[in-house]
Image (cartoon, rainbow, N blue to C red):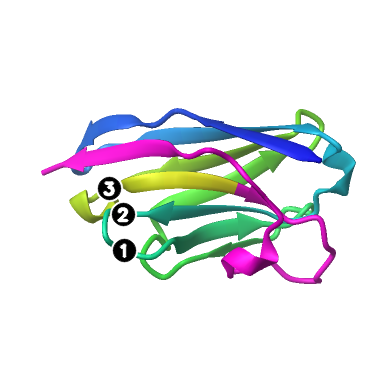
């Protein structure tokens, strides 16, 4: 099993920046891709972005150019740097991990096996 714990959420003004972290523990050698998803009230969970073990990244259209994902395999950490935040970025952000090698970063919830508990991000206008 793999446990994921997010941190770094909070309240920020529109145009500001926020950085999220995800700490993985347990059988972390099983992790290939890692991803970030978010869910706003009344909406479905949305793919934010993901990163392969080798560092290849993929982003959702709504965050491209504003968000950056990185990971430190030695520390079992994943990061999400969010810049130029907008009120529509308000959501609970979830870290996810995929134990399957796919040759690409997954974009669907079903492609991730382990999930964190989520951290709230609120962007005020």
Query: Residue beneath label 3, please?
Result: 90
At x 38%, y 45%, the residue is 92
Residue shown at the point (51%, 42%) measured from the top left? 80
- Please identify, in this view, whether the residue under mark 1 or under mark 3 is nearer the observer: 1
Q: Eyeballing the image, is 109 above or below 85?
A: below
Q: CA distance from mark 1 to mark 3?
A: 11 Å
Specify start and end residues of the magenta stretch as a single range: 96-125
To which residue does mark 1 refer? 43
Residue 105 is a magenta residue: yes
For label 2, the SS is: loop
For residue 84, the mark is none
Do tag 2 and tag 3 residues touch (Cβ < 8 Å)? yes
Mark 2 and mark 1: Cα distance apart in space: 5 Å
Residue 2 spot, x, y in % from top left: 77, 39
**In the rendering, at what x and y percent does residue 72 appear?**
72, 36
Residue nearest the observer in this picture, 94 or 80: 94
Q: Nearer the viewer, mark 2 or mark 3?
A: 2
Q: Residue at x 48, y 35 (%)?
A: 20
Q: Name the residue tied to disc 2.
A: 40
Contact flag, marks 2 and 1 (Cβ < 8 Å):
yes
Q: Quadrant of the C terminus?
A: top left
Which structural element holds mark 3?
Answer: loop
What residue is shown at x 41% (from left), y 59% (from top)? 65
């Amino acid at each position: 099993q793999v446990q994921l714990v997010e941190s770094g959420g909070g309240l920020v003004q529109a145009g500001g920046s926020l950085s999220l972290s995800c700490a993985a523990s347990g059988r972390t050698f099983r992790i290939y891709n890692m991803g970030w998803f978010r869910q706003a009230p009344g909406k479905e969970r949305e793919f934010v972005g993901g990163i392969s073990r080798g560092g290849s990244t993929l982003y959702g259209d709504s965050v491209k150019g504003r968000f950056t994902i990185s990971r430190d395999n030695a520390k079992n950490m994943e990061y999400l740097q969010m810049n130029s935040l907008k009120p529509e970025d308000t959501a609970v952000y979830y870290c996810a991990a995929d134990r399957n090698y796919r040759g690409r970063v997954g974009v669907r919830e079903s492609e991730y096996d382990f999930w964190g508990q989520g951290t709230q991000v609120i962007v005020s206008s």
